[in-house]
Image: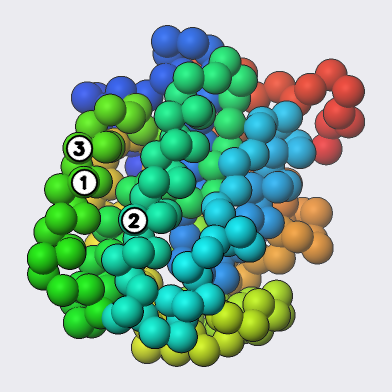
Amino acid sequence: MTSHSENKQGSDNSRSISGETGKVFISIAGNIGSGKSSLTKLLSTHFGWIPFYESVDDNPYLSDFYGDMKRWSFHLQVYFLSNRFINHKKIIEMPESVIQDRSIYEDVEIFARNLHEMGNMDKRDYENYRELFGIMVDYLKPPDLLIYLRANTDTLVRQIRLRGRSYEQSISRDYLELLNASYEDWVKRYDAGRLLVIESDDLDFVNNADHLDDIIRRVKNALPPTVSTSTKASQLAR
């Protein structure tokens, strides 16, 4: 199978948790519609990792935000930041291995940044938000591995339409392209831990077992060598 990924080692100064506890903390990053939640579920099932999903269906601001980004941008970003901080804190305190749908870093590096650059979050709110993020993230250890699902705009638009969330149908191509540009800039600078980039445009890991197996192999190879990737005894080997 043609290779669809690239690996990058993180900084030696990263404060990952695998070496301290034997557990593993994985986070999946990617644009809206890239397949993060689906891959989180599949890898969680295969490896026996506990999944933490992004707060979407129970988010009190999301629908209003897509109707009026300028009015609700700060409220939405603070909600996401608070929710992800709580989950991240739980993850690093619990003894079990965990896989997380979207990292806390994407809130400031991708979404808040774009909202500010588009004029949908004013300078005062944006600077306040970044300061709050800086204070909160300083208390958190980064994931042992960050998986970035790279997808082009056509893929994102198609998958957003397929999953059929009504409040997402107004998302423009231009907005998705801006987010993708921010993701690429951030991924180039990411040095908090190990990074695995997966080119997902030609993959169907939900319906194609070979594609999923290929991703599983890459995840195993990208993890720190001290981490065991054995699945639960009750699970069948793929």
Residue 183 on image: x %, y %? 34, 63
Which label belongs to residue 78? 2
Q: Nearer the viewer, residue 219 or 93?
A: 93
Other residues around mark 3 within 10 Å, as few (<14) / some (14–19) / many (≥20): few
Instruction: Identify which amino acid the numbered label 2 is placed on.
Output: Val
Q: Position of residue 127 (x, y in %)?
A: 12, 59
CA separation in Å, label 3 and label 2 = 13 Å
Q: What is the spatial separation of the Cα atoms under label 1 and label 3, in whole angstroms?
A: 5 Å
Q: Amino acid at mark 1?
A: Leu
Q: How is the image coloured?
A: rainbow
Residue 31 in sight here: yes
State the residue at coordinates (65%, 24%): 229
Say the numbered circle drawn on residue 233.
Answer: none
Above/below status of 211 relative to 191: below
Q: Position of residue 43 (x, y in %)?
A: 68, 42
**What label sits on residue 135 in the rendered view?**
3
Residue 91 drawn above or below residue 213: above
Secondary structure state at the residue bearing disc 1: helix
| Few, some or many residues within 10 Å of mark 2 (<14, 14–19, 20+) | some
Residue beneath disc 1: 132
134 left or right of 108? left
Mark 1–mark 2 contact, CB under 8 Å? yes
Q: Is residue 209 left or right of residue 73?
A: right
Comparing marks 3 and 2, which lies closer to the viewer? 2
Residue at 33 percent of width and 29 percent of height: 140
Q: Is residue 47 left or right of residue 238?
A: left
